[in-house]
Amino acid sequence: MTLRDPHAAQDLGALSALAPELAEMLVSVASDIALVIDDQGVIQRIALGGSEPVKTMADEWVGRHMADTVTIETRKKVEQLLADVAATGLSRSRQVNHPSPLGLDVPMAYSAVRLGQSGPLLVVGRDLSVVSAMQQRLVHAQAEMEREYWQRRQSETRYQLLFQIATDAVLVVDATSLNVIDANRAAARLFGLSLDQLIGKRATVPLHEESREAVLELFASAKLNGRAAETDAVLPEHRGMVRVSITPLRTEASTALLMRLKSIDPQWQPQAAAKLQSLMAMSPDAIVVTDADGLVQMANPAFTALAQVEAPSAVVGRSLGEWLGVTADDLALLMNSLRRDAVAQRIATTVRGEQGRLIAVELSGTCLREDDEESFGFILRPGYGSGAVRMPGLEPPDPSIH
């Protein structure tokens, strides 16, 4: 005898009178709900298990046709379930949705059996809400992972230009291993190593052994307190002194530390400054450096073109907020974010030129500290992509703006 044998249901006729008791037994051991239904599909009795959403709804189902308790989209499945059991005495599992007063449909999987040729139908159901929620979380988690992956792959990380042309040596250091995970060319020149040789090396190794202990303590202090800390250190072979500052840096993937080394050798600084000015002048991206109050200290020709002014000297001493079209409070909020996080990347905003032209841009910036003085470097690139982020006061521009 198979499950689909049409004569199988006849053997259950003796249980017809026990349908309510069977319903109670089934929900206690194998399901969340059991319905006793007549041959017209009308619900006569209900036994409930531990499914709270179903309990709330099922109180009003007695006396209603089962198809009237589900969403319009799944009524057809109830009709198919009843047709199956009418034809063979058994039905395969059908998934339907019950509308909930809480606003979210409750998914259920039902199977049915007829208790004898003229007996009632016993329909047992399993609440799929937990399974559905888990599937939804899995889908969301997968989508988030893919989104983060492509953002990392496609993000141009505008701050890299400032990072590469900075006068000082800058290294990004893994907070756990203290190994260098990124560095600029100034750091490679300072230590006399190639970038490939420097990346992956413990951050204290390129320093003279007499200075390593003090710098290790500096790393520990920055990680513990979450604030910048600095000390002086000696380069290998006593090639000069550097001032080392460590700042906690938040990244997408993990916690890192920003290690900045400023040469105290006066002969090295003018050479680096000259290279900085040359690279800024050639950059196609707009670059501007401000003081702690947001007043422009220097800007490159690309910025003056964006701001529609005649020369870099025409912007010096003026607030960057004049061209970003933000209030002093909004600009202060951005700069406080840079003080806290060291770097901000791809903020969608606009620049309004002095001749009225409005340009959509992505703004990236970094906070540069020297002794007790702060300055801020910004890169502004025309256009914005899907990876651009929002920030209060610096709202993404209208897509129609060019």
Image (cartoon, rainbow, N blue to C red):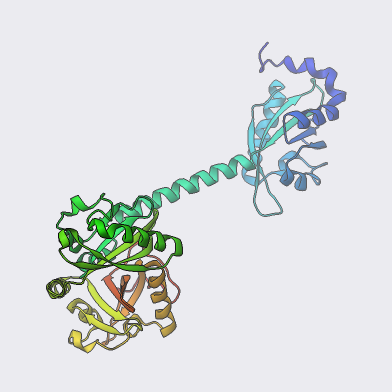
Front-lying residue, 375 or 189: 189
The answer to whether residue 13 is above or below residue 21 is above
Q: Can residue 360 be seen by looking at this rendering?
A: yes
Q: Can residue 387 be seen by looking at this rendering?
A: no
Could you tell me how many numbered marks the image carries?
Answer: 0
The quarter of the picture where the C terminus appears is bottom left
Q: Quadrant of residue 50?
A: top right
Expressed as whole percent of the image width and height from the top left, the position of residue 247 reads 36, 65
For the point 35% across and 50% down, which residue is it? 177
The answer to whether residue 177 is above or below residue 330 is above
Front-lying residue, 178 or 256: 178
The quarter of the picture where the N terminus appears is top right
Front-lying residue, 30 or 277: 277
Expressed as whole percent of the image width and height from the top left, the position of residue 318 reads 29, 88
Q: Quadrant of residue 387?
A: bottom left
Expressed as whole percent of the image width and height from the top left, the position of residue 371 reads 31, 76
